[in-house]
Amino acid sequence: MQVINGLHQIKTSMIRPHLPYVMSYAFEDKNGGVTLFDTGFGTDNATLELENGLNEIGYSLDSINNIIISHAHPDHIGMIDRIRKKNKHFNLIMSSVEYGWVNSRKSRNWQEIGNAWLSKHGMSADEIANSQQDSQWKNIEWPSLQDAEVVNDADTMEYGPWSFEFIHTPGHTIGHICLYERNNKFLLTGDHILPHISPNVSVDFEGKNSDALIKYMGSLKKVLNFETKLVLPAHEFAFKNLSERVNELLQHHEDRLKEHIHSFSSKPMTAVEVAREVSWNTGNFNNFNLMMKRSAIGETVAHLELLVANNQLVKINGGHKEVIWNLT
Ligand SMILES: [Zn+2]
């Protein structure tokens, strides 16, 4: 779909119930090349959809000069190695913070670390073993981001008729970036702001971003007053009222924080107990597959950590097998 002359939105499949597709954006430079913002999931089918999308506007995978990625999740970076097979010359551009984070996480057994983290937050070994696995994410490809060129907040890049500014918006991931196109006042938000769904904001298994929600809310406020004619997210659909949506998301998290506090009575709870107590618009926590349970608990911990930072809760770590939380 053409957004305006020279800018195209290309949808590729992801087959998630709530996020069925990823939207890449292709900027034409008018000299036979394109710059892509985000790729899509690393499957043959999705790669073919991207290739077809480029063909329809007169380009191929080999026409790509640059791939800018919003963050290093598989639905945004997944196709990189497949594109490399047909194009050896594109520049990969990503946030310096995300690059550092990805490099610090190499070669670990994430299944094991993830399970240890779940049990630390109160999930029984039985529930971990019996939760349905997520087949789509199980055999996921993690392309190499080694050769990436890194950018920092407020860096700019001129490309054909386009003037890009990279905006560091940590929260959904530690080094998430939005792309602001200054000439047309478009904000490409990746997964930072979606029009309908509230993006997942989770702590990671190693406690490196226990302040994820504090950062996320700061990043929402950072873009609140950006003069923006059109918001182009990576999922769902393009929309116009940036500040209205940002305020809704801020309010959503304020409401969620209250709901988390209200789930406590007199006794301490684990994050898993709190996650079972609060509501999820994606269904009942107990029916989630393991991947969704991890995201939900990560999001619960992010809320609990913010409440600790606000002195409304205490986190009790020492001497217990599990991490528990209680009212102050
Ligand atoms: Zn995504």
Image: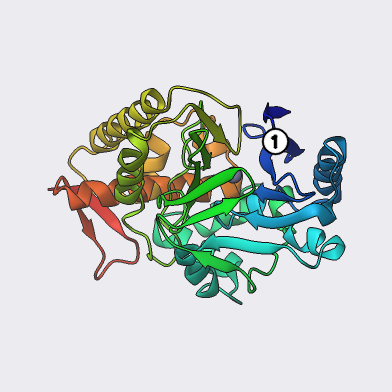
Residue beneath the point at 34% across and 34% down: 224
Color scheme of the displayed model: rainbow
Inspect this view and state whether residue 133 appears.
no
User: How many numbered circles are shown?
Assistant: 1
Q: Is residue 254 above or below residue 101?
A: above
Residue depicted at 47% across the width and 66% down the height: 96
User: Crowdedness of circle 1 by 10 Å Cα count: few (<14), some, many (20+)?
Assistant: some
In the picture, measured across the screen, residue 230 lies left or right of residue 272, that is right
Q: Is 30 placed above or below 66 here?
A: above
Residue 231 % position (x, y): 51, 31
Q: Is residue 246 left or right of residue 280?
A: left
Figure quadrant of residue 30: top right
Which is more toward the observer, 131 or 250? 250
Q: Is residue 97 visible?
A: yes
Q: Give the residue type that dot 1 points to.
A: Gly
Q: Position of residue 120 (x, y in %)?
A: 40, 62
Q: Residue at x 28, y 66 (%)?
A: 320
Residue 129 falls in which quadrant of the image?
A: bottom right
Q: Which residue position is annotated with label 1?
A: 6
Q: 119 left or right of 323?
A: right
The residue that appears at 76% across and 49% down in the rendered structure is: 31
- Give the quadrant of residue 235: top right
Instruction: Name the secondary structure under disc 1.
Output: loop
Which residue is more in the foreground, 263 or 217? Answer: 217
Looking at the picture, tell me which residue is in the foreground, 305 or 320: 305
Quadrant the N terminus occupies = top right
**Where in the figure is residue 64, as x and y percent of width and height?**
76, 54
